[in-house]
Image (cartoon, rainbow, N blue to C red):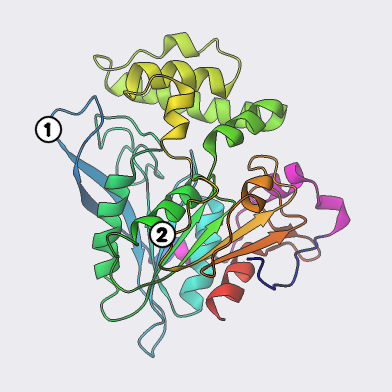
Amino acid sequence: MNSPQQLFQPNPLIRSSVMQSSLARRVPTNLITPRVVRPILLDAGEDKTPQANGERVKLLGYYGPGLSMNGGRGLVLLLHGWEGCSHSTYNMTMGDRLLRAGFEIFQLNLRDHGPNIHFNKYALNRGIFNGTLIDEVAEATHQIAQMAGDKPFYIIGASMGGSFAMRLALRHSQTPFHNLKQVIGICPAIDPEAAVKSIDKHSLYLKFFRKQWLSSLIAKQKLFPDLYDFRPVISMPNVFDMTDWWAAHYTGFQGAHDYYAHYTIAADGFRDLKVHTSIIHAANDGVIPVQNFYDLEPNPLLDLHIHPNGGHVGFIDLFPFHHYLPDLVMDILDT
């Protein structure tokens, strides 16, 4: 199940998980991605959240046409992580590399996520985001896959986006996506409860994710004060307790354990895989425990690329400063 790939070994000064994840937010100055992508608003089907009132789900994405003069290598769907967006640094650097390599890209924003450039991300849907909403992401993915035409279609997701990517790979076994050739998960959150408990144990990760999520909840409440009141979570010290209260009040689940269980991928979860799927992960990731992947049952279509360093969606090196994550992805796509 482990696939040969040159191990990522950054400068010793920045090998810690926190340094890797922090430096990964630094945006290179020469990216072409922001200049070429254009917004597309997708109808992602019926809104199944408890707050919906017969509405259709609206998901915002950004399409980037291929730069190749030879017809292009295919279309890549990029899925961001929790509280990230289409314009997160890792998405933009990945998109830049893919465009230069001859691919088209589609950077999809999950519900309540986005760069707030063309739309208020919280206003597009009354219902609130949660990690179990795979149906609407799958509906959008079917539409995006058709945009590839007769060329190959790929899915790449990071962190929570990696969780969605893995679940889309599994859904492909039952409801195939047009011309899907490969799925890649970068530090995918296949066990969300374990990920949240890791976050809560680390003060820096806890401070970051708790602040980001609380800000999102408050922004959603301001737009829909008749639907939401998140004041009780403001004083809660960790993400798990916040999730436990929020899940019971606004998602239809009994609490955090019930909620997380509904989108956890079990050790034997990839048994029916029908598409080549790769996982890129760092053993020193401070958010996603590496044991999650060592526990997976082997499958000839599932490759693990476990690097000793890289942090959570980091993979940064110095002298010169460089985002290596696109290199690791291209190594897989080029094989």
In the rendered structure, the answer to whether residue 333 lies left or right of residue 36 reads right
* Residue occupying the point 80% across, 46% down: 16
- In depth, the one of 29 and 159 nearer the eye is 159
Based on the picture, tell me whether residue 129 belongs to the magenta stretch. no
The answer to which image quadrant residue 255 occupies is top left
Q: How many circles with numbers are drawn on the protein?
A: 2
Indicate the quadrant containing the N terminus: top left, top right, bottom left or bottom right.
bottom right
Based on the picture, tell me whether residue 12 belongs to the magenta stretch. yes
Mark earlier in primary sequence (1, 2): 1
Across and down, in percent, residue 90 comes to: 56, 55
* Residue occupying the point 60% across, 15% down: 237
Across and down, in percent, residue 69 comes to: 39, 89
242, above or below 145, in the image: above
Q: Which mark is residue 54?
A: 1
* Residue occupying the point 37% across, 44% down: 110
- In depth, the one of 4 and 35 nearer the eye is 4
In the rendered structure, the answer to whether residue 155 lies left or right of residue 184 reads left
- In depth, the one of 131 and 323 nearer the eye is 131
Q: Which residue is mark 2?
A: 169
Q: Which residues are magenta?
A: 11-33
CA separation, marks 1 and 2? 29 Å
- Crowding at mark 2 (Cα within 10 Å: few <14, some 14-19, many 20+): many
Which one is in front in this view, the residue at disc 1 or the one at disc 2? 2
* Residue occupying the point 41% across, 81% down: 73
Indicate the quadrant containing the C terminus: top left, top right, bottom left or bottom right.
bottom right
State the SS at label 1.
Answer: loop
Q: Amino acid at mark 2?
A: Ala
Residue projecting furthest to the left: 54
Q: Amino acid at mark 1?
A: Gly
State the SS at label 2.
Answer: helix
In the rendered structure, the answer to whether residue 49 lies left or right of residue 166 reads left
